[in-house]
């Protein structure tokens, strides 16, 4: 019974491939027939990789199927790989699909860097190509179908419905994306088209390629993590090694997650990426790729698309659920929300290697104070400067601190700087610089519009250095210590073990101490929360209930790279998911107000 079921499954795979890539009966297709798993799309992806020119030139496929063109297909005898060649072959396939996985991200970058006219032409060419391929697939299905079956009223037969389901579903998906892109005035058509493709690749990639697939997902997506080491003289030579390590970490992760080919398992693993974060780094999540698409930015939308694939390959009436699930995954609200918080967002342009040089410190401080004064002159009630825009321990600089307190009588100032907690340090978190604590209940109720004279802030009291955000208002100050530190940049994984080891080898401490809570407050009668760079790409500040997030970043660490684009996509995802506005002040990359609206901000 089991052997019969396996044989029946193999026949389904073979028939599926034959419909799309039938050229002649060769030994190569026999190999595919017996080597692949039961999933149709897995075999399709393997064939697409072996013969990508079929997709890039579908008319050639049409001619081959009509017998007008001869082709040479490799046979089993020509594929006697050595172990090394087999490994290289798997690595090449993993690299190919690892690159395709990030296509929504690549398209978002293209829109950001290309001139509007050139980008419009590119979108037009993409749509022409996609529609042409879809039309060709449908024509191929009809042409290659049994003529006697077509003469009969076969459109109602179960066999014909199954054969026609996948190409028609693809056409239906493309049409839905086009229509909803027009409704939302969403210019990221490529992101919307490639997001379902990324999900399909994750679900159907053959398990034999899973390590290399994960390796190149890590390298293509997160190579920039290692770039921060350029500014640490003793570690700069480790940059290539760290890039390889990043690839290996994600290779091992996907080797585990994609161990089983079963589609239900793969869908579960896609959902688990919401909670599986290697070394507390959460930037690998399929749903983030939907942030600028016409699909809902949510786990539910991701699961709807994944289960639509599940049902479309089922040979039963359940196929009818596939288009329904696809429709559920789309976003229907077309209302555009406008931000009410009035603030000036400052963008600075200081390279990372010059920011901390003492010779540049005075000019940077002067420029920051000038930007604050300019915001006052322009009538802004709030000004936001980037992360560590004051490149010093601010609470140890009494003169600068008092200047900011004086300026805050005219404007609320949000600025990033280092904070040092020690007995000798200046305690600037109270009115009279005296050490005093406030109970945690009152700590959560902050109204900068009507701040009391006795109000004080209670920052983290553990001795050490903190990456902090200072909020100055009406002559008083609040301090928000960074709660979530960047792995390998601001803290070490397994910090309790590795930090003493690092200090023993290199002679200094690595990174900062952690804060204890997200600071939120009320200003301009609006609920506002602070997110210090990496915190803005996690749920923590959004779960405070604040609809306005003030986010400060210093992206000079990773410039030039794709880091800032990925950061923006993730922020957009959370802005849409929590219906929040993110006011993002940055160093070395463009500032932005990221809205919950579908499409471009």
Image (tube, rainbow, N blue to C red):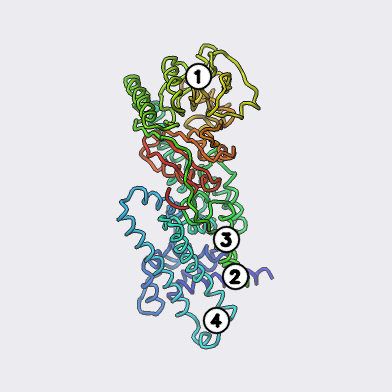
Residues at marks 4 and 3, CA–CA distance in whole angstroms: 27 Å
- Measure how far apart labels 3 and 2 are at the Cα level: 13 Å
Q: Nearer the viewer, residue 43 or 420?
A: 420
Please provide percent x and percent y for residue 333.
52, 56
CA distance separating discs 2 and 4: 15 Å
Query: Does the rendering let one see residue 212?
Result: no
- Which residue is label 4 attached to? 155
> Where is mark 1, residue-wise?
420
Disc 3 crowd, CA 10 A, few/some/many (<14, 14-19, 20+): some
Q: Is residue 131 visible?
A: yes
Neighbor class of circle 4 (other Cα within 10 Å; few <14, some 14-19, many 20+) is few
Looking at the image, tell me whether mark 1 or mark 4 is earlier in sequence order: 4
Which residue is labeled 3 in the image?
Answer: 328
Between disc 3 and disc 2, the foreground one is 3
Residue 464: % across, % down: 53, 20
Cα separation, mark 1 vs mark 4, equals: 75 Å
* Residue at mark 2: 320
Up-down relation of residue 552 to residue 81 (above or below):
above
Tell me where residue 407 sits by quadrant. Answer: top left
């Amino acid at each position: 019974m089991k052997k019969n079921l396996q044989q029946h499954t193999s026949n389904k795979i073979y028939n599926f491939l034959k419909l799309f890539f039938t050229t002649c009966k060769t030994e190569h297709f026999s190999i595919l027939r017996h080597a692949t798993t039961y999933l149709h799309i897995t075999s399709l992806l393997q064939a697409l990789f072996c013969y990508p020119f079929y997709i890039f030139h579908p008319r050639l496929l049409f001619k081959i199927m009509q017998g007008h063109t001869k082709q040479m297909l490799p046979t089993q005898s020509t594929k006697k790989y050595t172990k090394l060649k087999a490994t290289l072959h798997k690595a090449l396939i993993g690299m190919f699909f690892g690159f395709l996985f990030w296509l929504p991200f690549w398209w978002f970058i293209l829109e950001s860097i290309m001139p509007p006219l050139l980008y419009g032409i590119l979108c037009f060419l993409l749509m022409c190509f996609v529609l042409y391929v879809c039309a060709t697939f449908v024509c191929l299905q009809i042409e290659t179908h049994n003529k006697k079956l077509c003469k009969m009223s076969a459109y109602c037969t179960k066999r014909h419905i199954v054969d026609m389901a996948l190409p028609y579903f693809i056409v239906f998906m493309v049409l839905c994306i086009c229509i909803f892109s027009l409704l939302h005035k969403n210019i990221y058509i490529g992101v919307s088209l490639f997001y379902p493709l990324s999900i399909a690749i994750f679900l159907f990639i053959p398990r034999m390629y899973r390590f290399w697939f994960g390796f190149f997902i890590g390298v293509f997506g997160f190579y920039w993590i290692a770039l921060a080491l350029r500014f640490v003289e003793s570690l700069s030579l480790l940059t290539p090694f760290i890039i390889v390590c990043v690839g290996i970490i994600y290779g091992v992760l996907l080797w585990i997650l994609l161990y089983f080919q079963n589609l239900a398992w793969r869908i579960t693993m896609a959902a688990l990426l919401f909670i599986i974060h290697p070394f507390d780094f959460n930037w690998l999540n399929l749903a983030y790729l939907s942030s600028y698409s016409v699909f809902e930015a949510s786990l539910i939308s991701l699961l709807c698309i994944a289960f639509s694939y599940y049902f479309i390959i089922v040979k039963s009436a359940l196929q009818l659920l596939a288009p329904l699930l696809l429709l559920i995954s789309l976003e229907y609200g077309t209302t555009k929300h406008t931000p009410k918080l009035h603030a000036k967002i400052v963008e600075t342009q200081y390279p990372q290697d010059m920011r901390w040089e003492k010779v540049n410190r005075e000019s940077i401080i002067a420029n920051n104070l000038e930007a604050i004064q300019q915001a006052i002159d322009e009538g802004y009630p709030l000004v936001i400067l980037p992360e560590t825009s004051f490149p010093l321990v601010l609470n140890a600089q009494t003169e600068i601190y008092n200047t900011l307190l004086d300026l805050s009588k005219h404007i609320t100032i949000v600025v990033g700087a280092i904070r040092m907690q020690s007995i000798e340090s200046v305690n600037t978190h109270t009115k009279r610089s005296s050490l005093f604590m406030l109970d945690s209940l009152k700590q959560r109720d902050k109204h900068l519009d009507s701040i009391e004279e006795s109000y004080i802030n209670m920052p983290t009291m553990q001795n050490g250095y903190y990456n902090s955000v200072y909020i100055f208002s009406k002559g008083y100050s609040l301090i928000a210590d960074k709660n979530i530190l960047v792995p390998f940049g601001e803290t070490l994984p397994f910090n309790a073990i590795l930090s003493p080891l690092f200090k023993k080898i290199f002679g200094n401490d690595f990174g900062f101490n952690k804060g204890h809570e997200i600071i939120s407050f009320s200003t301009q009668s609006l609920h506002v929360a602070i997110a210090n760079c990496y915190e803005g790409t996690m749920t923590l500040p959004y779960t405070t209930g604040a609809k306005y997030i003030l986010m400060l970043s210093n992206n000079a660490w990773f410039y030039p790279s794709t880091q800032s684009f990925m950061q923006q996509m993730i922020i957009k995802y959370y802005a849409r998911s929590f219906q929040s506005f993110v006011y993002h002040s940055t160093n070395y990359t463009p500032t932005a107000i990221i809205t919950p609206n579908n499409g471009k901000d």
